[in-house]
Amino acid sequence: MFTKMTKSKHTFKIITFSLTLLILLGLITSIIASESSVADDNNEEDDVKDFEELLALDEEEEAAEDSQVKSAEAEVLTKAQRIVPELNMENYKRVVFEGNEFVLVLGYAPWCFRSAELMPRFAEAANVLNKMGNPIVLAKIDAERHPKAASVLGISGFPTLLLFVNGSSQAYTGGFSTEEMVLWARKKTGMPVIRLNSVPEAEDFLSKNRMFIIGLFEKFEGEDYEEFAKAAVADNEIQFAETSSSEVAAALFPDAKTKGHFLGLVKNEPETHVAFEDTLAMGKILQFLEYNKFPLVTTLTEQNSIRVYASPVKLQVFVFGNADDFKNLLAPLQDVARKFKSKILFVYVDITDDNLAKPFLTLFGYEDSKKAVVTAFDNKVNAKYLLESDPTAHSLEEFCSGLFHGTLSTYFKSQPIPNNENATVLTVVGRTFENLVLTSPQNVLLEVYAPWCVDCEDMSKKIVKLAKHFKGFDNLIISRIDASTNEHPELQITEYPMLLFYPSADKSNPIKVSAKSSLKDLAIFINKNAKVIKHNQEATAKDEL
Ligand SMILES: *[C@@H]1O[C@H](CO)[C@@H](O)[C@H](O)[C@H]1NC(C)=O
Ligand SMILES: *[C@@H]1O[C@H](CO)[C@@H](O)[C@H](O)[C@H]1NC(C)=O
């Protein structure tokens, strides 16, 4: 349900944004035309090419549009231009270092597509902030045309956003949508909290904000309140609201406590309300937000992946599937997620998106899976888990409960168990490592290799020869394991190829044998350490000769 909502919102944003972009591109045509030497490396050339294609598209579209739309666009453009002054050598010192307390500067280059993408949102943010009466000035500078001014400001890449507070700059740490830029700017310009005085105000606020934290305080002063206000500034992405009226608080958070102060996070999705129940301290509030800001089930995207990976929630369930799987699994997932709210992070990954899904699926040897895969991670102990049965409401709940209570068995990759009958060198896989290597009565020599390891081939040849030489010896197993597709907790890989000797008397302390050893060295080593006793019958037969 909520994905649909964000999607349509997103589409709307894209449409408005594209419209503004079209105008902007039109403007930049003239700049590009006058700047003949735009690109000298491939990237830049690509940018220009993309850009020109867009311009051509722009012209086509423009021709199709009637003049009324055009004049409306021109109006928006002039307004944006008026609100976002262009800095140059003559005015930058005055604007940034002398005249204004807060200046947010966008450094761009006319050929840079990402700059062009950002600019209309930047202009819109300027417009919104301006309407709010925020004192911040949003300004832009063509860093290619004015390299000296750009360098004084500290702009080195495109696009760059920097906030100047009384002339000293600080990094921009907010998001890149209009909404996120406005929110961040407000936080850094002394308006981190919106005060709500009446229920209608609160309702209006509720309709306009996707996620926020509401604080109910009798008075907007005192130590507790200060902590709240400090957290509002320190956080970079969540709107803080405050009220002293319990009716207002209840309009936003139906179960708000009415005695003393109350803090609650409100999210526009199925699990809407999370109350803060700790002592009021900035660090605790920020931590609370970190743990609770994600939806019940977060859909992983290129845009949010960094935030998701940075989550302090150590227990994470990742569900991989196609759109249909997700539709079927969403409701049961949300039910489970509600039970483990702020304890387990639930992430959905589109299995058809190789960039996002493959790196995870490879960890389980499921990189080619077409079916839904449910996995979990405990990042505190670096363990991974796999739901081996089909995902259902029941199996998901059991799996998550096991994850939470630490009772799941860690997943180790394993190929299917091979038939080792007649094999000179036994093939060990993840699932047979225990039986063949650790608990078998024999001495075991294990060659650890990976298919991509070129140096491993030499070693493999030596091992085959060695195995032929020692064939028929009762107390010696010569074996190999492909460690790229097989794992075991007792098998710690430090290099490829790796040669390990497990003495029958002490399997828990394998001896690492140099991979550079000659065939003869290896034979001597085995004779010495395995106290080789020949196979009885064969020995007798040979003795008889
Ligand atoms: C900027 O400077 C003015 C004048 O000195 C001062 O009143 C104001 O508090 C300063 N702003 C910040 C955010 O430090
Ligand atoms: C092992 O060798 C025996 C005897 O040569 C043969 O009958 C059997 O098929 C072989 N098994 C496999 C799996 O190759």
Image (cartoon, rainbow, N blue to C red):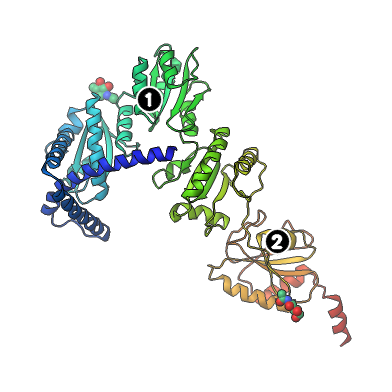
Near-viewer residue (195 or 515): 195
Amino acid bearing label 2:
Thr
| Residue located farthest toward the bottom when viewing the structure as drawn | 545
Return the x and y of residue 129 as percentages of the image width and height.
25, 28
Any part of residue 478 in sight: yes
Q: Which residue is mark 1?
A: 206
Q: Which mark is residue 432?
A: 2
- Taking the image as shown, residue 409 lies to the left or right of residue 304, namely right
Callout 1: few (<14), some (14-19), or many (20+) C-alpha neighbours within 10 Å? some
- Residue 218, located in which quarter of the rendered image? top left
Q: Is residue 418 left or right of residue 270?
A: right
Give how far apart the Cα atoms at labels 1 and 2 are. 58 Å
Give the image location of residue 103, x and y in percent.
Answer: 23, 32
Which residue is at 49% across, 31% downward?
Answer: 271
**Amino acid type, callout 1:** Leu
Residue at left 52%, top 60%?
A: 368
Q: Earlier in the sequence, mark 1 or mark 2?
A: 1
